[in-house]
Amino acid sequence: MSVRILDVREITQPISSPIRNAYIDFTRMTTSLVAVVTDAVRDGRRVVGYGFNSNGRYGQGGLIRERFAPRILEADPASLLDDAGANLDPDRIWAAMMQNEKPGGHGERSVAVGTIDMAVWDAVAKIAGQPLFRLLAERHGVQADPRVFVYAAGGYYYPGKDFSQLRAEMRSYLDRGYTVVKMKIGGEPIDQDRARIEAVLTEIGSQARLAVDANGRFDLETAIAYAKMLRAYDLFWYEEAGDPLDYQLQAALAEFYPNPMATGENLFSHQDSRNLLRHGGMRPDRDWLQFDCALSYGLCEYQRTLKAVRDAGWSPRRCIPHGGHQMSLNIAAGLGLGGNESYPDLFQPYGGFPDGVRVEDGHITMPDLPGIGFEGKSDLFRVMRALAE
Ligand SMILES: O=C([O-])CC(=O)C(=O)O
Ligand SMILES: [Mg+2]
């Protein structure tokens, strides 16, 4: 029984809010929602795979419509199937999308491809009748672990937000079961950020740990000044201090910051990730890698990134992807990552978990839903279905 891709649809949707990090605001943020419509039928329904890109980059409608969707639709359908001919082959679809693309310069193209790739994997797992995390574990010959660590990202700057609101936000994450919370830094003078950090630490006490995220804002001097301030606190991590591609800055910073650091959400290929591991002075015994497949050519590429991680002597457990989407939850549960980001109050309906999934002691347990599990999140599935039907 063969499978054909009948259509690849895209719509650009707002995920805007008045929040701001040290680099951008989200007042005009958008995401691309993609549906890969197949002719396969499971449980009496046509199989449609869905994908979207992570927050922080914008919708990719132009690239998807002009280059990547046509390449899939114009390919010989048989060339997109696995050897048995019974399911789609994500790597072959990926290769079809990337034909006539030069290497290097991994930017927005990687977001467009990653978005379609998410939808392809969703379709493949649905056609196989499995949750994606179980399919992945099986393909890699490893044991799936449906229990995944998640942390609550927030603590943004926004107009009129004072310490009491920041504390209340963090308290609400603790009330919802999180044990690690994250806040933004670098958007105000260092003394003001120090006061914000102390306010949050007072609020969370010994109930949770705090991570801070500078969103690539600092030059080396400022990154070091913050390192000296931050190292007095027992933080979960100090994230993206300098420009994502400035590996020398990252390496130099390690001299001033013995505690855990994190970066990688703005590296969009396995080659860029490998360069971070080669030249960024990151320490495999304590630091964290945040590569996000939805921004970086998808899961086909993320598997190559994981190989680069292992080849550099790191454990996949040191990976906690950026983005807060269910795709990375599946990868974490299927391939043994250290966990996943979560934005409890932001970027809805795209982020979060299937309905009924609760955070307990900083972990969620993946339900056994076919594919990525979008059908289990009713607000999200409503927008998805509107695109495909
Ligand atoms: O504010 C953003 O762009 C999101 C971000 O860095 C994160 O979730 O780590
Ligand atoms: Mg970040």
Image (cartoon, rainbow, N blue to C red):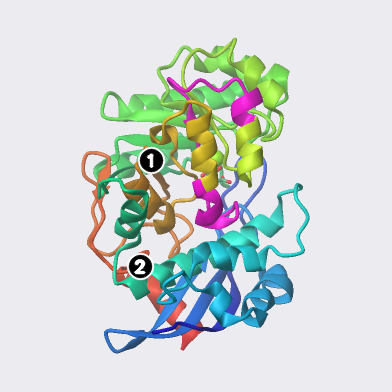
Judge left or right: residue 65 versus residue 382: right
Query: How dense is the environment of label 2, judged by Cα within 10 Å: few (below 14), some, or many (20 and up)?
Result: many
Q: Which residue is the site of mark 2?
A: 371
Q: CA distance from mark 1 to mark 2?
A: 19 Å
Query: What's the residue type where badge 1 is placed?
Result: Leu
> In terms of image quarters, where does ligand 1 lie?
top right
Query: How dense is the environment of label 1, judged by Cα within 10 Å: few (below 14), some, or many (20 and up)?
Result: many
Residue drawn at x 25%, y 43% is: 177
Query: What's the residue type where badge 2 is placed?
Result: Gly
The tag on residue 373 is none
**Placement of 13 over or under 98, stated as above or below:** below
Residue drawn at x 44%, y 23% is: 198
Judge left or right: residue 360 versus residue 156: left
Q: Which residue is the site of mark 1?
A: 337
Q: Earlier in the sequence, mark 1 or mark 2?
A: 1
Residue drawn at x 71%, y 20% is: 220
Residue drawn at x 49%, y 48% is: 303
For the N terminus, give its image quadrant: bottom left
Magenta span of residues: 276-303
The answer to whether residue 29 is visible is no
Is 296 colored magenta in this rendering? yes
Q: Position of residue 66 (x, y in %)?
A: 74, 75
